[in-house]
Image (cartoon, grey):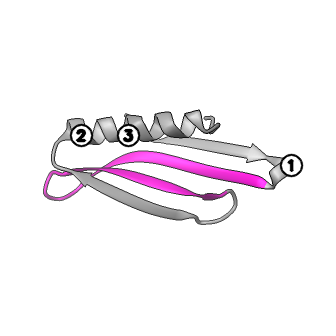
Amino acid sequence: MTPVRLTRSDPNCNMHRFYSLEFATSLFGERGVVRHWGRIGTSGRSRTDWFNEPQEAEAAFLVLLKGKRRRGYTS
């Protein structure tokens, strides 16, 4: 899967956020889901969750993506 970058803006609430998801692979063959989020214009924060099986990583990726889209984030 390709990296996904989502944004959510609401000028009335002064909300301008970004959220990105991508895959990573460790030296030991583990698959990871890298999340990067924050206010647009800042460096933001990041977190990587590691999984032993590629299917687990793909499932987690899709769950996170679906949740963010449900909250109003768009591509």
- Verify whether residue 36 appears in magenta: yes
Amino acid beneath label 1:
Asn
Q: Which mark is residue 12?
A: 1
Dot 3: element: helix
- Asked whether the beta carbons under mark 3 and mark 1 sit within 8 Å of each other, the answer is no
Q: Residue at x 75, y 53 (%)?
A: 15
- Verify whether residue 31 appears in magenta: yes
Q: Is residue 29 above or below residue 5?
A: below
Spatial distance from mark 2 to mark 3, Cα to Cα?
Answer: 9 Å
Amino acid beneath label 2:
Glu
Specify few, some or many for label 2: CA neighbours under 10 Å numbering under 14, 14-19, or 20 or more: some
> The N terminus appears in which quarter of the rendering?
top left
Q: Which mark is residue 61?
A: 3
Name the quadrant containing residue 42.
bottom right
The image shows residue 54 at horizontal and vertical percentages of: 21, 39
The magenta segment: 15-39
Q: What residue is disc 2 on? A: 56
Farthest-out residue, left: 28
Q: Is residue 26 above or below residue 74?
A: below
Dot 2: element: helix
State which mark lies toward you, 3 or 1. Answer: 1
Spatial distance from mark 1 to mark 2, Cα to Cα?
Answer: 38 Å
